Amino acid sequence: MRVFSIGADDDFTEYEAREFEAEHEETVLQRWLEANPDGILEDSGILIIGREVSTNLGGFIDLLGLDRQGNVVVVELKRDRTPRDTIAQALEYAAYAERLDADGLERILRAYERDESLSLADQHRKYFTLNDAEAVAFNKDQRVVVVGQAVTPQIRQTATFLGLKGVDVTCVEFTFFQAEGGRRLLSKEIVVSGSRLQPGPVSGTRIRMTEIHFLESCDEHDKAVFSRILSWARRNSISIKWGRGFTAGVDLDGKRVLVCEAYARDTDWPQHLYTPLRNRASGLPTAAVPEAVIDSLASQAQVTGLFTDTGKSMKCDINRAFADAEVDALLAWLESVRQAIMNHGPETPPESRAALHGGDE
């Protein structure tokens, strides 16, 4: 991939791709990932609870974390190992992580944070801004993330195979760029998604959810509702991105603000439709919709009888046959959300707000 900056006179200046090994040791990439864990996965942030975590077989896990559902995430840098050794090492660490109970995970967190008073449950709930109704069972499953500047075809193929067999492996490529003057950029591409899919057509070694896969995972009730939601999104030029399910978003000034999202039935999540109205802590771009408008939208959603308010999102359970009038009401409400986002534009980041106010915030 080639990356350019655009100057004031519309002239292009190319950023030069640099090898991490040449200018940045893998430990630097590890530190970057540790400081920016929300940039690792495509469907969830990660609460980092350990770095260089020692295992019972004498190994060291680069980064250990938890996703929103409480699953353990093992992040392993490829380094200079062979593809076979990279996968074997990551699976060995995942096998060790599977043995950890909540107390063991809490001990790792306390050692990492150097605070013996920390509660794993409290830290997890605070990090993901969970409400009281969202119960989490820690380490019901494990996820593996292999990170490198170049993820080889052998690693991709093996990770794809493991994904089809139910082992959640994500492969992420990072590339470091530098231009004249020292400006730096870091690109990220998920080359193998951790989605657990049923066997089906695969393009190369890259597994991605598609609309066909998603609808095939639905029962007849889900399919009827989601088909209409996806059709509504296309009619209104709402971008659809596929991962473990789909996200539907509005593109505003280069930022993609989510309208709604849903996961495929054969993933770990129940069949719900989510709309992240209040989730400004998600790390995703949000719209500058006033709280009064958000409260009004939440009230309108509850009037339909289809939604429950989780505190930061509205959740619609799609676990039965919906009447046409109910789907009409659902789509009308989603259209109200889209219009609110379009009317108010993207939220200004805190650092930009501070600049606008002379840095007084």
Image: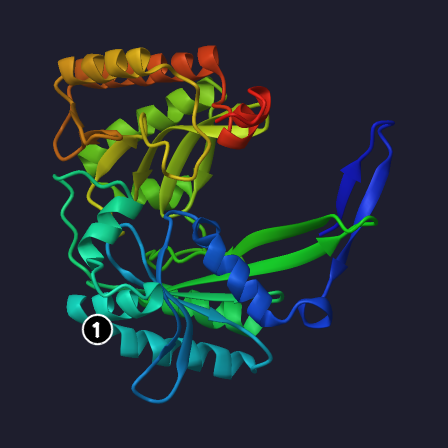
At 19% across and 14% down in the image, what residue appears? 299
Residue 169 spot, x, y in % from top left: 40, 65
Residue 94 seen from this side? yes
Position of residue 97 in the picture relative to residue 248 (left or right): left
At 21% across and 30% down in the image, what residue appears? 311
At 57% across and 64% down in the image, what residue appears? 29
Q: Secondary structure at mark 1?
A: loop
Q: Nearer the viewer, residue 158 or 45?
A: 45
Pick out the residue farthest to the bottom: 57
In which quadrant of the rendered view does residue 210 lie? top left
At 28% across and 50% down in the image, what residue appears? 68
Graded by Cα atoms within 10 Å as few (under 14), some (14 to 19) or many (20 or more), the crowding at tag 1 reads some
Tell me if residue 205 comes above or below residue 242 in the rendering: below
**Residue that badge 1 annotates:** 100
At label 1, the amino acid type is: Leu
Residue 346 spot, x, y in % from top left: 49, 22
Position of residue 346 in the picture relative to residue 175 (left or right): left
Q: Nearer the viewer, residue 86 or 15?
A: 15
